[in-house]
Image (cartoon, rainbow, N blue to C red):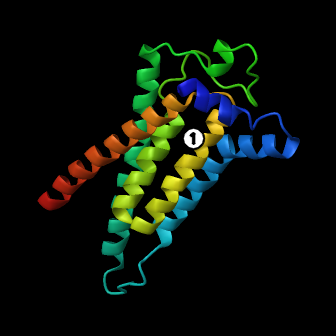
Amino acid sequence: MNYTIFFKLYGLAHQSNFLDWLIVFGAEWFGYIMILLAIAYLAFHTDGVFDYRAPFLQFRNKVREMFYVFFAAASAWTLATIVKSYITAPRPFMMFENVRPLFLHGGLDSFPSGHAMFFGALATSLFFTHKRIGILYFVVALIVGIARVASGIHFPVDIFVGYIFGIIIAIIFRLIFKKIKQKS
């Protein structure tokens, strides 16, 4: 099933220059743009309430919120890097000679996907802090994951497990930060 889904999505690659560009954009650049937009959103979104009497309190809460969201996502990325150093998993273009990736990325470090772990954790932690933007970022994570499979550099199982690990990491950090917030 993993290979079947992979070849269905990979079948989108090498069909047209525009589609290839779109897949590469989704796999590489789209995520970075969405990270910058998440930073801007978290920094400037006020839920329509600004208390001019306590601006430093609001600033402190914004910093905490940003720290939680991006610390969870960065921790997921770091964990993916550590796990990849212990698990040898060839990328699709290394296993199948007829697979020509749209861009070169890595070698024997396919499982789990660091991008999927990062965006799974980012979307989940954003969901815990701002439900609507979190739902949007689950869609962003899905787009990035599908594009990475379609580009020929990941198998669907790499992406799926990355999402699961990223979500679990965000949940763990949510529980930790909730305990810390209760104590302060």
Residue 1 visible in the picture:
yes
Considering only vertical position in the picture, is 108 above or below 23?
A: above
Viewed as shown, does residue 154 lie left or right of 128? right
Residue extending farthest to the right is: 17
Identify which residue is drawn at 47% across, 36% down: 160
Farthest residue in the left direction? 183
Tell me the residue at 73%/40% (across/down): 24
The image position of residue 115, as x and y in percent, is: 53, 38
Q: Residues within 10 Å of mark 1 (few under 14, many from 20)?
A: many
> Is 172 on the left-hand or right-hand side of 46?
left
Q: Nearer the viewer, residue 55 or 130?
A: 130
Identify the residue under disc 1. 145
**Residue 92 sits in quarter:** top right
Question: As rendered, which of 91 and 80 lies closer to the eye?
Answer: 91
Tell me the element at label 1: helix
Q: Amino acid at mark 1?
A: Gly
Between residue 58 and residue 182, name the one nearer to us: 182
Q: Quadrant of the C terminus?
A: bottom left
- In the image, 170: left or right of 31? left
Please tell me how many numbered marks the rendered image carries: 1
Residue visible at 44% across and 60% down? 134
Q: Position of residue 165 (x, y in %)?
A: 37, 36
Seen at 37% across and 44% down, the residue is 167
Q: Is 13 positioned to the left or the right of 93 in the image?
A: right
